[in-house]
Image (cartoon, rainbow, N blue to C red):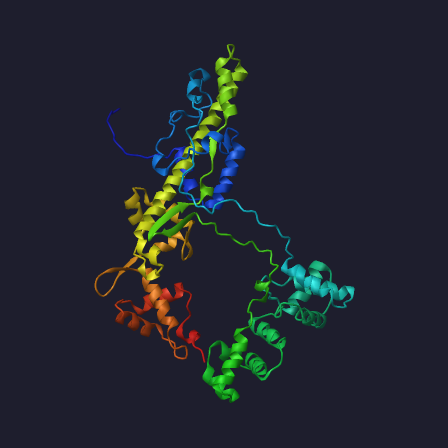
Amino acid sequence: MLKQFLNLKLSQKLSPQQIQLMKLIQLPTQAFEQRLLEEMNENPALETGTDEEEINDKDEFDNDDETNDEFDDYDDNDSEDTSDINIDEYLSSDETPDYKTQANNYSDDDEERESPLVAPISFHQDLINQLNTFILNDDEREIAEFLVGSIDDMGYLRRSIPDLVDDMAFTQGIYTDEKTVERMLHIIHELEPSGVGARDLQECLLLQLKHKTPTEYVALAIDIIENQFDAFTKKHYDKLLQKYAVSNEQLKTAIHEIEKLNPKPGGSFTGSNKITEHVVPDFAIRIVDDELVLTLNGRNAPSLHVSKDYQEMMQTYKSSRDKSNAQKDAVQFIKQKLDSAKWFIDAIKQRQETLYVTMNAIMHYQQEYFLEGDETKLKPMILKDIADLVGLDISTISRVANSKYVETPYGTKLIKEFFSEAMKNDQGEDVSTLEIKKILQNTIEEEDKQKPLPDDQLAEILLEKGYPIARRTIAKYREQLDIPVARMRKKI
């Protein structure tokens, strides 16, 4: 039996343009530039550069709603009849195109800079080059080069001698014995940086100490690492004083010699070819006459326009009397590219607006911090606070804050670091967890390093300052700040 009834439901479907906008918003400046290049390569109807007529005619953010809506109602259905296309809507009679993405609030320091390229020598190649200064026969050189190839990026050889002997026999056809490999390893221990080729931290520190100019304190440091390594790592200084019958000052000097060593000799190699991440600030905040001024990096606002050549093709099609099938196919292709170019330009413009209004809201919300630079002035702030201020979805705010940086008078900061949960102090006021972490960090920095404060005493001190924090919360914040436990903070 058939029944007919009405059913109301609310659903939301994202258009391709909305998806494109969300993806663009979450991109930081460098990734956005790469995405722009990809779109330029894929769509010949999209061009960059500023026409002469456009130089003195830049849009304000406040006027960005004056966009050209000519193409908004078209879809990309390949089967669309070209007779339904209104050619006039793709032609502009204005000398200056309507879609421009310039604004007057870009950073002054946003011009492109080219850095000289270098061809760095890798860490392992540098070690092999140093081996050339030693007199070795062919077999010894093959073994030494195999050992160098087995050293990790931190400078350690984390494989046992028997394993290396077996590996050389099975994979390289190099047949040798443990004694020869040990002898080649001693040669590698002579290479720079000192400590390279060590099999553990203890050996690494010993190699570096033995490369130092011999003094009584270096000798004491060597003895400590060789024979009292466990007591040293656990900072049992009383045990070391009793063992060596030295004064506090003598032991302190010896330990200072150890502290100057590099536990990761390979990581300090200046010719390392590791990829270095360069942070490009997406925003800049400056203080002018005691007022905050926000600018958007101009690299986020390229000068884009729709190709005039493609518009002229449309004009030619309109003027022709006999329209062949090939011309109809061509105009359909041109229409799709023009639509895509227009959508992309509009998406970039909306991206600019979204980035600016979001960062502007964050700047004013944390105005006291940006004016003074005191991290204890940071207010509790969650994504919903900013979303309510600007009238955007929480997910949009998250995309803006997640991977963007802002240049401030106090350094370049990751925007998401300004967000924090709230906790109540002893007066019932909401304070930021960032403020509590900063106070905790200052308290630990000011402690007596000979008697560092355990977590329960830190909790008592913060309670006296008006922050009732549990000991386990202190431990959590301390770990987030990468601060070790009290025993590991102890100094003689």
Task: Please indicate, yes or no, whether residue 85 appears anywhere in the rendered image.
Answer: no
Instruction: Check the image and report above or below for 348 versus 291.
Output: above
Expressed as whole percent of the image width and height from the top left, the position of residue 383 reads 32, 49
Expressed as whole percent of the image width and height from the top left, the position of residue 249 reads 49, 84
Give the number of marks: 0
Observer-nearest of 364 and 5: 364
| 383 relative to 316 in the view: left or right | left
Q: Residue furthest bottom?
A: 245
Q: Can you say which quadrant of the picture contains the C terminus?
A: bottom left
Q: Residue furthest top?
A: 321
Residue visible at 54% across and 54% down in the picture: 276
Q: Quadrant of residue 158?
A: bottom right
Observer-nearest of 79 and 369: 369
| 25 relative to 111 in the view: left or right | left
Expressed as whole percent of the image width and height from the top left, the position of residue 317 reads 50, 16
Task: Please indicate, yes or no, whether residue 278 appears anywhere in the rendered image.
Answer: yes
Q: Residue furthest right?
A: 137
Expressed as whole percent of the image width and height from the top left, the position of residue 379 reads 30, 56
Observer-nearest of 406 and 107: 107
Instruction: Check the image and report above or below for 47 versus 325.
Output: below
Q: Residue furthest left?
A: 427
Q: Can you say which quadrant of the picture contains the N terminus?
A: top left
